[in-house]
Image: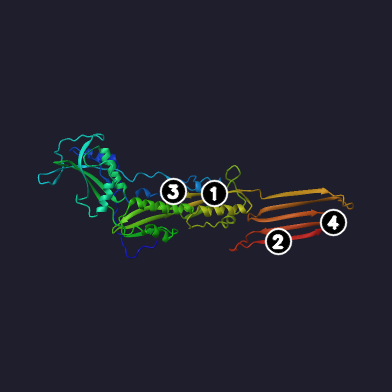
């Protein structure tokens, strides 16, 4: 997708910080001399715009397993088939959190609890009475957009005024606020007031979506991407909606049997989304001849005779649908017992190496048949009729076919030579050539 020339944010990126596991936070606080405040370790921030959508294309290719869609496309002996990373259970979007306890001063302000405070030792199941629940920005002020405040409040299930809450219940509501998709961070702060403990969720909304840069998508239609993002322009980036769009893009590749997926998403300054798409291009194509037991063997067919039949070429985005058509084409040559195409990652390059496993048929043979007719009563072979043929289906390893036959009838005998070259070497238009010679023979 071409970049919008009005945006230049290459050197000014804003990356949402990575998740930290809960045990990391606890280890960090352990080294502080003062006791942890009420509901410690409940601060939650989203790692990146759909961090769980960042998949390695190498991992994608190397973990290929049986998929129902590809089972319909590839022969049963093609053991390495399309795998859907998209069907794997993705890790939760949410991670860890921290809740700080503040104390109202005499003038109505708020003071953060310091190390002088008495020890607060609470477990996940101990309940704390909450008198008021508010949603504010990260500076503790009212949100400019009331609709975002309403979204955050609507996400709350446990945290209500005049309710007794546990740390676990507060953490669940922090997850729900982030899970709404509109906020990149959420910190619950407990404020000790004259009326009781006030629970304030300090949130940071996502940026407004102002533009899109899509990189690495060579076969993905520009219009398809634009249509998916069109409704979001000028609106707050919703991570849940973004995740749906990413799954839709990945689905576009899957439906067409293409090796491609969204490997990364980044929010640039100014509300620009940068979408990184990885498409597995074909690197090398090799041929491995196998016998009927699956052991490597020496093949009689020249590699170029097989490779020229393929529509899959080096540098193209690998397509399972095209691979299926190539398998059918190779089997139609009539010289192969079985064909399978196995994709493997080409190191860490993001490309794919293809191995063609070929099991050759017996290329030549002799056939004969005959009988006796009462219609022929003279000659050294009186009454004998029949035919004999010698054939080869893969002459010189070039898929050329020759058939030598002799037929004796009641009246005359005929000798025939049939030669067919299905693809004249050096011709790019797949021109074929057939020569037939026959002559009568007198016995």
Residue 114 in picture, x, y percent from top left? 15, 41
- Of 84 and 15, which appears nearest the observer? 84
Distance (Cα) linking label 1 and label 3: 18 Å
Q: In the displayed structure, does residue 217 sit left or right of residue 378?
A: left
Is disc 4 placed on a helix, strand or loop? loop
Q: Quadrant of the N terminus?
A: bottom left
10 Å crowding of disc 3: few (<14), some (14-19), many (20+): many
Q: Which numbered dot is residue 390?
A: none
Few, some or many C-alpha atoms within 10 Å of disc 4 (few <14, some 14-19, many ≥20)?
few
Task: Find out whether the residues at labels 1 and 3 contact each other: C-beta distance under 8 Å.
Answer: no
Q: Earlier in the sequence, mark 2 or mark 3?
A: 3
Q: Which residue is mark 2?
A: 435
Q: Secondary structure at mark 2?
A: strand
Answer above or below: position of 192 versus 346: above
Residue at position x 38%, y 49% in the image: 53
For the residue labelled by badge 1, is the local secondary structure a helix, a strand or a loop?
loop
Near mark 2 (Cα within 10 A), the count class, few <14, some 14-19 or many ≥20, is few
Q: Can you identify the residue that label 3 sits on?
A: 60
Give yes or no for contact between labels 1 and 2 (Cβ–Cβ under 8 Å): no
Marks 1 and 3, the one that precedes in the sequence: 3
Name the residue carrying label 4: 411
Q: What residue is shown with label 1?
A: 74
**Quick check: can you spot residue 58?**
yes
Q: Residue at x 59, y 42 (%)?
A: 293
């Amino acid at each position: 997708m071409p970049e919008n020339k009005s945006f230049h944010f290459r050197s000014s990126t804003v990356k949402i910080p990575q998740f930290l596991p809960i045990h990391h936070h606890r280890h960090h606080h352990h080294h502080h001399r003062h006791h942890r405040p009420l509901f410690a370790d409940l601060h939650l921030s989203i790692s990146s715009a759909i961090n769980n959508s960042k998949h390695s294309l190498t991992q994608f290719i190397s973990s290929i397993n049986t998929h129902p869609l590809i089972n319909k496309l590839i022969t049963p002996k093609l053991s390495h088939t399309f795998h859907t990373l998209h069907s794997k259970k993705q890790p939760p979007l949410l991670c860890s959190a921290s809740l700080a306890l503040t104390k109202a001063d005499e003038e109505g302000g708020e003071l953060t609890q310091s190390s002088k405070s008495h020890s607060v030792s609470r477990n996940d199941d101990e309940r704390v009475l909450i008198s008021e629940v508010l949603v504010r920005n990260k500076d503790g002020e009212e949100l400019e957009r009331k609709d975002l405040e309403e979204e955050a409040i609507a996400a709350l299930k446990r945290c209500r005024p005049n309710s007794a809450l546990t740390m676990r219940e507060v953490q669940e509501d922090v997850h729900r606020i982030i899970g709404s998709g509109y906020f990149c961070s959420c910190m619950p702060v407990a404020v000790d007031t004259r009326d009781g403990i006030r629970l304030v969720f300090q949130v940071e909304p996502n940026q407004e979506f102002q533009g899109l840069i899509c990189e690495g998508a060579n076969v993905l239609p520009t219009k398809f991407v634009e249509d998916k993002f069109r409704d979001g322009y000028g609106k707050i980036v919703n991570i849940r909606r973004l995740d749906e769009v990413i799954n839709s893009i990945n689905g576009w590749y899957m439906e067409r049997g293409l090796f491609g997926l969204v490997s990364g998403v980044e929010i640039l300054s100014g509300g620009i989304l940068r979408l990184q798409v990885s498409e597995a291009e074909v690197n090398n194509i090799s041929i491995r001849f196998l016998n009927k037991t699956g052991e490597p063997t020496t093949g009689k067919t020249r590699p170029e005779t097989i490779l020229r039949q393929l529509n899959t070429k080096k540098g193209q985005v690998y397509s399972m649908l095209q691979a299926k058509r190539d398998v059918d084409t190779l089997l139609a040559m009539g010289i192969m017992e079985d064909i399978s195409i196995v994709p493997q990652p080409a190191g860490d390059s993001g490309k794919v190496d293809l191995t063609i496993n070929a099991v050759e048929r017996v290329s030549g043979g002799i056939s004969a048949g005959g009988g006796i007719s009462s219609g022929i009563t003279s000659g050294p072979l009186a009454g004998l009729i029949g035919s004999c043929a010698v054939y080869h289906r893969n002459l010189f390893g070039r898929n050329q076919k020759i058939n030598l036959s002799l037929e004796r009838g009641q009246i005359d005998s005929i000798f025939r030579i049939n030669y067919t070259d299905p693809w004249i070497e050096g011709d790019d238009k797949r021109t074929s050539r057939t020569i037939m010679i026959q002559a009568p023979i007198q016995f």
